[in-house]
Image (spheres, rainbow, N blue to C red):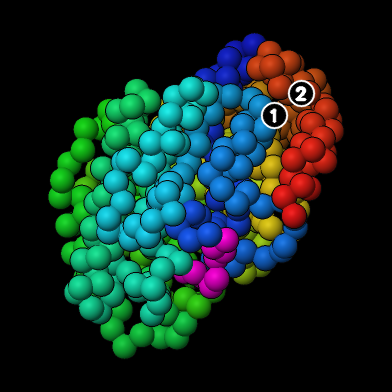
């Protein structure tokens, strides 16, 4: 079919995937012992499957196991609440790079890149549902300080690891019912963002991204940081827009947005997730949406213009298994797109041969994709076929099931 499988594998092997730490402990973090996400910011984590990581060392061990089953190169995506505070209460407006020294040393030793996120939820100052767009200027200032510090921490990670850290900002701000004044809230958010991004960081160390959302649990009627708000802000200020696959109307295609946004933004950050009804964070599987997103990235020749990051959390099954399932699904979607007989499809289209275009796309669906994927796993030194499942079961038996 005119497909160069070696070239496809080489392209796949170059593209890092940022693995979110928060699947490993149900978005709990290490600020308080045994913390779990209790209604924080409309992020609903359901399930109580045993084996949740309770300490930084457990989380790093679980990540190591997961990453050994995922073809590289690897990045790990941290949230501010995963700092190591040595039993001390360090509030969000007081964190600094020293609290992430353990993560940085680990990433350095393992040759992982690190990405970072401010944590503007699961906190008393977020109790009324608003952070950077809070009506109280003191609370806004608290969160501005938090995010500013997070950008400094991200830049420190970028410097230490020699690879720019992507700092993504998502806030929960919104309301269950219709607010009296949407405009004022968005003006406050804009003012807060202006204060946060006023200090420029070296792009070699830190890349800033901002993430919008349509609605959340408890913010059904209004979300301050909507898609339009952040897209406009990102374009005006040279930040990356973050598109989360679970943050749009269910029939709205994120795939179709990529070629539009990339006309105006040099890069886009994709939060790879799976929306199911009202939940935006199911484990990624190789579904039509993932395939369509990856096809659009490849067809736009934009492999070096997208940042790929996982974002989901499921506490109802083996969490290491959840990581690996989603990560491999993303890479498989990407490989399928790279194996598309693109040149011939374009030829057909240019010649007005719409039947030929459709027939080639259909025929490509039954090509032996699995063999190429297995070869990729083999070349990358990770288990091919179904062998990764047994590896996860062994880890569960020996490690996870002993956590009580
Ligand atoms: C929430 C956003 C955000 C979070 C993480 C934990 O709707 O998608 O990216 O999932 O920051
Ligand atoms: Zn997200």
Q: Secondary structure under badge 2?
A: loop
Along the viewing direction, whichever of 232 and 30 lies nearer the viewer: 30
Query: CB of residue at label 1: within 8 Å of ligand 1?
Result: no
Q: Which residue is mark 1?
A: 69
Mark 2 packing: few (<14 Cα in 10 Å), some, or many (20+)?
Answer: many
Residue 47 seen in the figure: yes
Q: What number of labels is visible? A: 2
CA gap, disc 1 and disc 2 = 6 Å
Q: Work out whether mark 1 precedes mark 2 in sequence or the reverse, and give the earlier one.
A: 1
**Which part of the image, by quadrant, shows the C terminus?**
bottom right
Q: Residue at x 69, y 38 (%)?
A: 324
Q: Is residue 238 above or below residue 381?
A: below
Location of residue 393 in the rendering, given as x and y in whole percent from the top left corner: 82, 38
Q: Which residues are magenta?
A: 34-42
Q: Is residue 337 above or below residue 401?
A: above
Q: Residue at x 69, y 42 (%)?
A: 320
Residue 268 seen in the figure: no
Query: CB of residue at label 2: within 8 Å of ligand 1?
Result: no
Q: Which residue is mark 2?
A: 383
Along the viewing direction, whichever of 219 and 127 lies nearer the viewer: 127
Mark 1 packing: few (<14 Cα in 10 Å), some, or many (20+)?
Answer: many
Q: Do the numbered discs 1 and 2 sit on residues whose CB atoms are within 8 Å?
A: yes
């Amino acid at each position: 079919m005119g497909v160069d499988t070696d070239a496809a594998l080489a392209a796949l092997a170059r593209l890092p995937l940022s693995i979110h730490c928060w699947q490993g402990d149900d978005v709990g973090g290490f600020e308080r012992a045994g913390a779990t996400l209790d209604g924080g910011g409309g992020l609903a984590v359901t399930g109580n499957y045993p084996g949740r990581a309770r300490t930084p060392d457990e989380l790093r061990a679980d990540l190591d196991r997961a990453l050994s089953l995922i073809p590289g190169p690897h990045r790990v995506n941290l949230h501010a609440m995963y700092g190591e505070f040595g039993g001390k209460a360090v509030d969000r407006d007081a964190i600094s790079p020293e609290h992430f020294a353990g993560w940085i040393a680990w990433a350095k030793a393992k040759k992982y890149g690190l990405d970072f996120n401010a944590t503007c939820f699961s906190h008393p100052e977020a109790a009324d549902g608003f952070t950077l767009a809070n009506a109280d200027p003191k609370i806004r200032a608290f969160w501005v300080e938090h995010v500013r510090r997070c950008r400094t921490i991200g830049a420190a990670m970028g410097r230490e690891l020699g690879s720019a850290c992507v700092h993504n900002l998502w806030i929960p701000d919104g309301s269950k019912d219709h607010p009296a004044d949407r405009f004022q809230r968005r003006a406050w958010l804009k003012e807060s963002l202006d204060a946060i991004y006023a200090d420029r960081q070296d792009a070699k160390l830190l890349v800033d991204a901002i993430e919008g959302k349509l609605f959340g649990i408890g913010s059904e009627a209004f979300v301050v940081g909507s898609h339009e708000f952040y897209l406009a802000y990102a374009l005006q200020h040279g930040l990356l827009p973050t598109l989360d696959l679970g943050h749009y109307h269910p029939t709205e295609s994120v795939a179709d947005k990529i070629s539009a946004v990339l006309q105006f933004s040099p890069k886009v950050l994709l939060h790879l997730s799976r929306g199911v009804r009202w939940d935006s964070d199911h484990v990624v599987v190789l579904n039509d949406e993932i395939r369509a997103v990856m096809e659009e990235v490849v067809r736009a020749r934009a492999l070096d213009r997208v940042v790929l990051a996982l974002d989901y959390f499921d506490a109802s099954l083996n969490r290491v298994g959840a990581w690996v399932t989603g990560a491999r699904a993303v890479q498989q979607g990407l490989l399928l797109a790279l194996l598309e007989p693109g040149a011939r499809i374009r030829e057909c289209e240019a010649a007005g041969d719409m039947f030929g275009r459709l027939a080639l796309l259909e025929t490509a669906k039954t090509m032996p994709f699995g063999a190429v994927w297995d070869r990729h796993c083999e070349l990358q030194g990770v288990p091919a076929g179904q062998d990764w499942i047994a590896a996860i079961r062994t880890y569960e038996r020996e490690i996870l099931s002993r956590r009580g």
